[in-house]
Image (cartoon, rainbow, N blue to C red):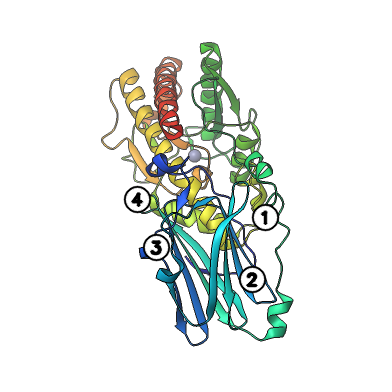
Amino acid sequence: MLEKIAVLVTLIVCLFTNTLFAQDLRALARIDTVQSTIADLSYRDLEVKLNLSQPIPYRIFLLSEPNRIVFDFKEVDWTGFSAKDILLTEKVTELRFGAFQAGWSRMVITLSEPMLLDKVGMLTGSAKGDATLTAKFKLTNPEEFLANVGAREDAGWDLPNAISATLPKQRQIGDRPLVVVLDPGHGGIDSGARQDGKLEKDLVLLFAKELKDNLILSGRFKAHLTRDEDTFVSLSGRISKARELGADVFISLHADALKSGWATGTTVYSLSDEASNEASAYLAERQDRADLLSGVDLSKQSDAVATVLMEMARVETKSRSDLLADMVVSGVAQSVGRLRKRPHLFAGFSVLKAPDIPSILIELGFMSNQSDLNNLMNAEWRQQIIEGIVLALDTWSVEDAAQAQLLRQ
Ligand SMILES: [Zn+2]
């Protein structure tokens, strides 16, 4: 998790995260002195390891005369924090900490020798919902230290209000119509599967339009399509479009063909754990980070910082997506009467990798199977599936809103 960071100063904007952290979201973070140390790794390396009761935004920078390392955090409750218990090095002559300005806290480490930040990372995800910030510093010469002194001008850092204004929009709490973005797979030069002269791109577009009309007619949803004609849309373009449209939910629709010939029936996919992690690493490598998390500009952040942010948002989104997939499975099972043996599967589809929008992919059926293909072309069957999906979205939006309310308490 610890990645080389080129820039000296980092800022992590913490997102509202995992349900496991729920009880602490409004409480101040505390530092567990027992699990925290400032210690030598070698004669030239110093490690600052802080165990926090929850992930929080932070930044690190250097000050001179005397040489100091400064950690700024979103407000910390310092109760029980003791410098002498965590200081296990001669490279530090003094450790101070306390409130810095409204909503923010500061820890200042005075150094006996000039040191530069080498690596930093915040690991989250334990069952307790805590986070460990690990920063490694290495000896340097006075000239290089001086060249790296100063706080970077991160937009919004000195204006805590500006930061909260750039957080992603609140997850839905049931007080407005759910915004559902439907994503008919393929399109344009990409036909998807083809069977008996039928093209997947046409069948899923027809289905998506019918589903959209049903959602809107119910009066409880706003619904949009990532494409409403036979055009090509890139996978990342589909996610960007969903974000632009303010999606609460993203549903990709397919009817692929499988070579084996045995696949049949409706299947609902959500992102697998492994794919989640790969997705984070992949997304963090991308140049266009700015649009990946709505409202949070990651383009100035290092890869490591961006990856942490992605992970934190994704943990909550993943459980919301899994719940939606399960509810679509039971909704469709109710409306159609039966489903295949394992109707909810996990996969690494790129189109499910938005870190902050609950996303599922529905394989309505497989065109390679004759009865599935007949179903797909049958308006009555489509209407049954649509009723199952609408039922699922109704159930999910209530349950999801209830969980969001719990998070706020
Ligand atoms: Zn497809």
Q: CA distance from mark 2 to mark 1?
A: 14 Å
Marks 4 and 2 close (CB-CB < 8 Å) = no
Q: Residues within 10 Å of mark 4 (few under 14, many from 20)?
A: few
Q: Residues within 10 Å of mark 1 (few under 14, many from 20)?
A: some
Q: Which residue is mark 3?
A: 33
Front label number (3 vs 1): 3
Q: Which residue is mark 4?
A: 128
Marks 4 and 3 close (CB-CB < 8 Å) = no
Q: Position of residue 176 (x, y in %)?
A: 55, 20
Q: Earlier in the sequence, mark 4 or mark 2?
A: 2
Q: Position of residue 30 (x, y in %)?
A: 44, 53
Which residue is at a point 65% across and 29% down the rendered structure image? 229
Q: Is mark 3 within 8 Å of ligand 1?
A: no
Marks 1 and 4 close (CB-CB < 8 Å) = no
Q: CA distance from mark 1 to mark 4?
A: 30 Å
- Which element carries disc 2, helix, strand or loop? loop
Q: CA distance from mark 4 to mark 3?
A: 16 Å
- Which element carries disc 1, helix, strand or loop? loop
What amino acid does circle 1 point to?
A: Ser
- Which element carries disc 3, helix, strand or loop? helix
Q: Which residue is mark 2?
A: 6
Q: Earlier in the sequence, mark 3 or mark 1?
A: 3
Relative to the observer, which residue lies in front, 211 or 367? Answer: 211
Q: Position of residue 143 (x, y in %)?
A: 72, 84
Q: Is mark 4 within 8 Å of ligand 1?
A: no
Front label number (2 vs 3): 3
Front label number (1 vs 4): 4
What amino acid does circle 3 point to?
A: Thr
Q: CA distance from mark 2 to mark 3?
A: 29 Å
What amino acid does circle 4 point to?
A: Lys
Q: CA distance from mark 4 to mark 2?
A: 31 Å
Residue 374's place in the image compared with 13, above or below, is above
